[in-house]
Image (cartoon, rainbow, N blue to C red):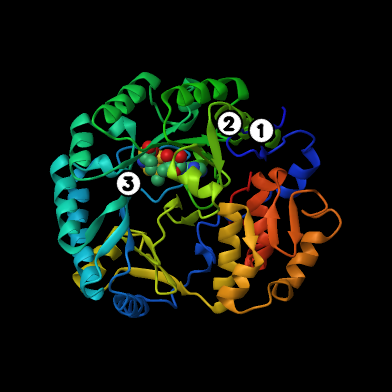
Amino acid sequence: MTAATTEMTGREVTPLQGTAAKLQRYDRPGPRYTSYPTAVEFSDGFDEAAYRGRLEAAASAIDEPLSLYVHLPFCEERCLYCGCMTIITQRHDVATHYLQYLEREIEMVAAALQGRRKVIQHHWGGGTPTYFTVEEIERLHAVISRHFDVQVDAEVAIEIDPRATTREQLRTLRSLGFNRLSMGVQDFTPDVQNAIGRYQPEQATRELYEYARSIGFNRINIDLIYGLPRQNVESFSRTLAAITAMRPERIAVYSYAHVPWLRPHQKHIDASELPSRDVKWQLIGTAIESFVDAGYMPIGMDHFALAEDELAVAARERRLHRNFMGYTTRRAIDMVGVGLSAIGEVSGAFAQNVKKLSSYFRAIDARQFPTERGYMLTEDDSIRRQVISELMCNFFVDGAAIETRFGVDFNRYFAAEFEALRAPGGPVSDGLLEISPRGIEVLPEGRLFVRTICMHFDRYLQRHQDRPTFSRTI
Ligand SMILES: C[S@@+](CC[C@H](N)C(=O)[O-])C[C@H]1O[C@@H](n2cnc3c(N)ncnc32)[C@H](O)[C@@H]1O
Ligand code: SF4
């Protein structure tokens, strides 16, 4: 495989040859860094009273816009690879009951925020949000609109499973103001779909996509996964070609997170059918080449966007952000998460809701927030979080900006980390990273290893060496 160069960026992206030794060294279990500290650091020492306190503290920033994440965890069937927090049931009455409680949680959060109601990023995720009927979707939306003002320029996004979404639902979503769709595809190859228990004909997916276009959805993301059982370069290339022909504005190609100790249903995946590390590397390499050739710009580690998409523009200007909902250009200082297992970040703390329905119902009946655990960030966490976030989003950390924001001497603060990174056989000598007086820059060859690079700045990783915790970084 050859190095690919993009005219859009003028930058070379990810040379892929001669990397066996590096793969050996850098493809390790590690966090995805949708947050720092990662969710494994959350503890039940941070409880509902702590969360209530954070919400009340956040209320004073009355005009600051929020991000609002709504978790809708139901699916009718389970895909064997799924790593999301889902409840599999055909009993729609359970889901309807859930909605009633979710509405009450939204009311409680709004009350604690005391009139802080502007929303700049609004996201419904799952599970499968289109599990709900048109009437239920409308009703939930009405409750949210009663308590929050979603701004005209807000990103209003929803995750949809094309197998479980009707045209009527799409029309409803459009009329309610949803302006971004995230569609799960993963892989169109029938043999792979058999191995993962997800049957999704290419043609039906394309028809739904075209219909969404025809009713005005002009921001569509498509999710793929590499590293699934029975995937090979040849068949994955066909999926890649089909997707680039559709021309979604954004494409995510996630590395399959195989974590059967956390998601026991993944044990039904035949591990002997998983592609080897080398094949995985070729799969992501092929994806990068296909997308760059088709005019997409690589964003962060695993996303691609058309050159004119705002994510691509922000990436070029190094002002990309990342939160639990993924890469974004909309930065809200606080993110409120509602629903089962939802994670929020409010006034310097992470808070996660309970994952069991019965506990969720019980908390709301007691007029308590259903907080299960959380984490109050220290100053050191905030500094490291900024460094990790800049690396993951922009592949560059401006040392002076860290000094100005946090009042620390950048080089002194990270002296030990820089020494480790510069050690022989480490990322600097391997040409993955440059540390200069300006800051830290991830070089093209280091982009796919950025999670492993970030691990150097994570002060909590040592605690998790003795048991499986994270998926592999490639
Ligand atoms: C929360 S799911 C919701 C999407 C929707 N239910 C569907 O299946 O189309 C969002 C995306 O997460 C990704 N995903 C789920 N499990 C994963 C895993 N174990 N490893 C990597 N990505 C995963 C898939 O690409 C999926 O489309
Ligand atoms: S991938 Fe989507 S549809 Fe499949 S189980 Fe996970 S959330 Fe449900």
Q: Which residue is mark 3?
A: 157
Whether residue 425 appears in this view of the structure is yes
User: Which picture quadrant has residue 148?
Assistant: bottom left
Mark 2 or 3, nearer chain start: 3
Dot 2 and dot 1 residues touching (CB under 8 Å): yes
Q: Is residue 336 or residue 295 the one in the foreground? A: 295
Instruction: Report x, y in % for residue 121.
Output: 34, 55
- The quarter of the rendered structure image containing the N terminus is top right
Q: On the rendering, which quadrant does ligand 2 occupy?
A: top left
| Above or below, 83 relative to 35 | above
| Above or below, 400 relative to 139 | below
Q: In screen coordinates, is 326 left or right of 2?
A: left
**Label 2 Cα crowd, 10 Å radius (few <14 / some 14-19 / many 20+):** many
Q: Residue at x 73, y 67 (%)?
A: 417
Q: Residue at x 30, y 38 (%)?
A: 76
Q: Type of residue at label 2?
A: Val
Q: Type of residue at label 3?
A: Ala
- Distance from Cα at disc 2 to Cα at disc 1: 8 Å
Depth check, mark 2 against mark 3: the one in front is 2
Instruction: Report x, y in % for residue 390.
Output: 58, 59
Q: Secondary structure at mark 1?
A: strand
Q: Which residue is mark 1?
A: 5
Indicate if the residue with disc 3 has its beta carbon within 8 Å of ligand 1. no
Q: In screen coordinates, is 447 left or right of 420?
A: left
Q: Which residue is mark 2?
A: 292
Instruction: Report x, y in % for residue 431.
Output: 79, 48
Q: Type of residue at label 1?
A: Thr
